[in-house]
Amino acid sequence: MTKVAQVLDEVTLYGDHPADRITQGLLRLNTAMRNRAWNWAESAGLTPTQGEILMLLMQRKKPLRLNDIARETALTAATTSDAVSTLEEKGLLEKRRALDDRRALAVKLTPRGRTAAKRAAQWPGFVSGALSALRDDEQTAVYSGLFKLIRELEIRGTMPAHRMCGTCRWFEPANADGARRGTRAKVAKPDSFRCVTLDQALDRSTLRLDCLAYEAGDVGTQARNWKLLKQI
């Protein structure tokens, strides 16, 4: 088979539309990240799944129940239970009564677990290092595209919901406050938004994928905000 035939055969196999090429790029990136995750995990005496649970608990800054962990990480209940039990045996997690239901159990990081979680959060740094070589506008374009891709996957039910801008009740267009008061406001840029509760301006480079101030908006608000975000 000639090189031209091989290339054409590869195009037939993987597709040649932009979406196909992006998918292939993401798959290759996933391979590199999976390899790095296993290298870190083995050096720490853990698995990538266990490291992910530690990082989740560190990000949430509060105890979580097993079903919450399973939902956030897209793991089965059995896998979550096994991973949490192992982490508890290693002294990285401890169980306690859930604050919202004293009959239920939740898990939290121990001091050793918090140290392990901080180390786990460092292994993706090789991607951040590579991204820093891109121009600022390129980094913004990559992040904006990923943000919208993640939201689209959420809508299709193939990714767990995130505490992200656009689905939060506090997220709104930058000129929404003036519109509510009936005052004339400067025409806002298409990618100009604000967080009401944090009183913070937002644009396509500063939208949040995970925020502690998050409160889910109603269906209508989420749909309206998504329509705006798709345009930027």
Image (cartoon, grey):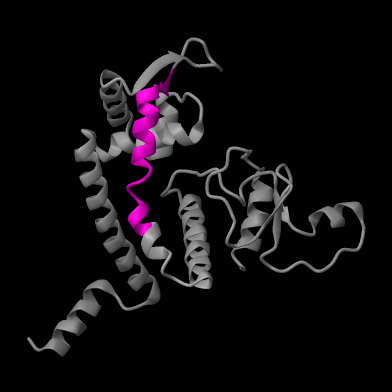
Q: Residue furthest top?
A: 103
Q: Position of residue 18 (x, y in %)?
A: 39, 75
Closer to the camera in the image, 133 or 51: 133
Would you say 197 lies left or right of 167 here? right
Q: Which image quadrant is residue 216 in?
A: top right
| Image position of 106 with respect to 70: above or below | above
| Image position of 34 with respect to 94: above or below | below
Q: Position of residue 10 (x, y in %)?
A: 20, 77
Q: Is residue 117 magenta?
A: yes
| Image position of 126 with respect to 88: above or below | below
Q: Residue sitting at 62 percent across and 52 percent down? A: 166
Q: Residue sitting at 53 percent across and 63 percent down? A: 144
Quadrant where the N terminus sits is bottom left
Stretch in magenta = 106-127
Q: Which image quadrant is residue 110 in?
A: top left
Please give the count of numbered marks on the rendered protein.
0
Q: Position of residue 132 (x, y in %)?
A: 43, 64
Would you say 47 lies left or right of 205 here? left
Q: Residue furthest right?
A: 183
Closer to the camera in the image, 221 or 3: 3
Quadrant where the C terminus sits is bottom right
Q: Residue sitting at 59 percent across and 57 percent down? A: 206
Q: Position of residue 223 (x, y in %)?
A: 64, 54
Q: Is residue 16 magenta?
A: no
Q: Residue sitting at 72 percent across and 42 percent down? A: 197
| Image position of 67 with respect to 43: above or below | above
Would you say 39 lies left or right of 123 here? left
